[in-house]
Amino acid sequence: MTIFKKTNNPSPSLPSSQTPRTQGTPGTSAPSSQTQAPTPSSSTPPQKDAFGKKTGVTESTPLLGAPSTNPKDTQRAHEQLQSTPRKPIYSPAKEPSQHRENKFYKDGSENENIHTVIYKSATPADSIGWSQHEFFEKLGDHRHPVGSAERNAEQEYLLANMPKGALHEAAQIANKTGVGIAVRGTGLLAHMGIESGSPTKAQEFKNKTSKETDLWLCDAMTFGDVGAVVHYDPRATGTTKDASLPPIPGREPKQEWQQFVDTAWSAKRAHIEQHRMPQLESLTRKGKVSVPHDEKQWAQLKGQFESRLAEFRDEDSHYREGGPYAKHVSLQGPFIHLKERPGEHMYGDHDLFAFTTGGFGKLTLDHTPQLRDVQKALQEADTFQAQHGGIWNWQPQEKSHEAIKAKIMGAHSPPSGEPLVYIQPGGAVSAAFYIPADPSTQTEEKLISAWDAPNATKWLESTHSGAELLKKQNTAS
């Protein structure tokens, strides 16, 4: 996998136009009569890709959702986009960037993407949801009619897992390149920040985006901050760095670490019950924030506490004076702000899972020039701003990293996983599960429609439409 530096182009950098190729429908293969996406060995006229290598291309059809195919209309729209006021674009820092090893990239380019989020901002000119109404109306598995309870439930899930601007950008790229794009969901509470032009989290920053549970752990956070990238000490009196607190030990030996966590959590839980609950009472009364009611829920909150504690220990030095990212960021309370974007929170990036070619759910490695160009286009898209390659392509060399990858992959498999947002050429966008290979049953590794795993219903429970559908089905049975 290769990473690319950000250019000053205002729109996604796409490989030369290619004929869109339908990858097929759930449970079927693409018909052999359809035009196949060109490969570097095809006999079509050669052009150069991002690596300066030759690649075959063919003429394209109009981009997905375009209001007109008239060249004059297209040019006029482009001129209007160019005239839209944008935030300044700065030149990247000239001095070499310090960076730790990145487990996705091993070519020395790990720190280049930090300039993407620091030096470029693109605020949407209008609501893509209104201007591309037809595209969004057709989201979901076509086997369910538009307007049906099943289609509504899937559409709600898809829109809750990716901002509309990023979804439409990815669909344009998939349509133009003939490549399917599977993406991990982005938290709903981060959508507003992303679509308003706030910076997304560069891959160098390992801190997680905030969730509702962080409101219990961080007194400095408000409900409107949920979704932002945070960095704080979750102990009772700490939000950023408190010299009065004892240093956080290493996680080995495990027994000593667990003893430290248990002691710190005991004080934190007392603080939550005595102070934080009254502070959040208006939110809990309105049902915006869930209160831990039993020991199982308290245990889940403790798990989040431990995760934030370890994260603070591991990452804090990187943001302090002398750390590799101190020149780029400042810590404002529990938030990591870019110095070039003062006062703006960072939000979660869109995690690429994998690419597909040749048929519905057929996974493919991203080492070809064509797929590198697709990744570059996703990286340079104004709202999508991909920060790394697909997790499926990661080949971890250490046991701990193998466990991390296995956990991520399993998080998108039935029966209890969350479906991926799967964007195919031709405007097909659906919820899809990852199915690992199983030699014992001769099951191949692939993506399948979420509807083809009927026992997996947890994803439906996450939306109002899905919950209503399940209720209706249970009543009927």
Image (tube, grey):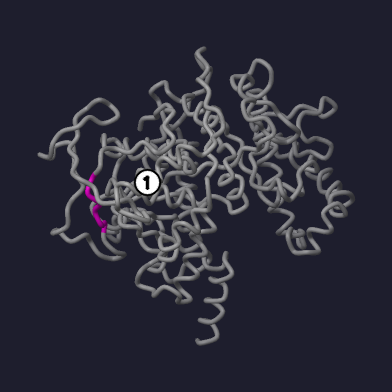
Coordinates of residue 190 in the picture (x, y in percent): 60, 48
Coordinates of residue 72 in the picture (x, y in percent): 32, 47
Q: Residue furthest left?
A: 43
Q: Quadrant of residue 255?
A: top right
Q: In which quarter of the image is the N terminus?
A: top left
Q: Name the residue under label 1.
A: 354
Q: Quadrant of residue 306?
A: top right
What SS does tag 1 mark?
strand
Pick the front one: 433 or 39: 39
Coordinates of residue 341 in the picture (x, y in percent): 63, 30
Q: In this view, does 95 lie to the left or right of 267?
A: left
Pick the front one: 388 or 251: 388
Q: Is residue 90 left or right of residue 337?
A: left
Question: In the displayed structure, would residue 402 be above or below residue 184?
Answer: above
Coordinates of residue 328 in the picture (x, y in percent): 61, 23
Amino acid on which disc 1 is placed = Ala
Question: In the displayed structure, would residue 431 be above or below residue 376?
Answer: below
Name the residue at 67% across, 38% down. Answer: 230
Name the residue at 45% across, 46% down. Answer: 406
Q: Is the magenta stretch mostly helix, strand or loop?
A: loop
Question: In the displayed structure, would residue 179 be above or below residue 455?
Answer: above
Pick the front one: 118 or 131: 131
What stretch of residues is rendered in magenta?
Answer: 18-23
Q: Is residue 474 left or right of residue 359?
A: right
Q: Which residue lies furthest to the top in this view?
A: 95
